[in-house]
Image (cartoon, grey):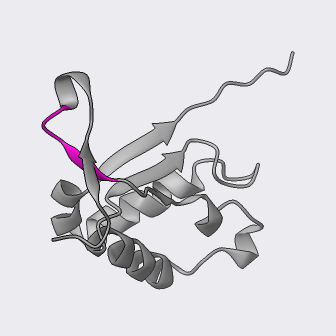
Amino acid sequence: MSPIPTIPLGGSASHINIGRVAFGCMGMTWCDPSLRTPDQQAFETIKAAVDSGSNLLNSSAFYGPQSDPYANLALLRRFYEAYPEYKDKTVLSVKGGCNVEK
């Protein structure tokens, strides 16, 4: 049994259970690129969260600096490439954005 209680998603996804505590990935990449969390440290942190039952990973198309807004999604791609067995253990929540400048 997972240390973090789980709940089912609703509607057509009610067969999927997620942890009541999600794991936010923003802090790993939403910073100056020189201060980014090293990949291996980020990967170990993600694995520890998922293994504890926090299987909902919260990411975004803008969790990176202006020079690399997709940095967080790229980090998750590298994570899944390095640890493909975690693909079936996680649910991704990815927020999008739009440019409102004219």
The structure residue drawn at horizontal position 36% and vertical position 46%, both measured from the top left corner, is 92
Q: Is residue 77 left or right of residue 80?
A: right
Image height of 66 relative to 39, above or below: above
Q: Residue furthest top?
A: 102
In the image, residue 24 lies at what x, y percent?
52, 58
Image height of 9 relative to 99, above or below: below
Between 77 and 45, the residue placed more toward the observer is 45
Q: Is residue 45 left or right of residue 54?
A: right
- Specify the quadrant that holds the N terminus: bottom left
Residue 88 inside the magenta-drawn segment:
no
In the image, residue 55 lies at what x, y percent?
31, 59
The structure residue drawn at horizontal position 37% and vertical position 54%, both measured from the top left corner, is 20
Between 65 and 50, the residue placed more toward the observer is 50
Between 15 and 74, the residue placed more toward the observer is 15
Residue 15 inside the magenta-drawn segment:
yes
- Specify the quadrant that holds the C terminus: top right
The structure residue drawn at horizontal position 35% and vertical position 63%, both measured from the top left corner, is 54
In the image, residue 83 lies at what x, y percent?
25, 71
Q: Is residue 36 left or right of residue 1?
A: right
In the image, residue 70 lies at what x, y percent?
58, 48
Q: Quarter of the image holding residue 51?
A: bottom left
Image height of 29 relative to 64, above or below: below
Q: Quarter of the image holding residue 64?
A: bottom right
Q: Residue furthest right?
A: 102
The structure residue drawn at horizontal position 60% and vertical position 68%, both measured from the top left corner, is 28
Q: How many marks?
A: 0
Image height of 79 relative to 56, above or below: below
Magenta residue span: 14-19
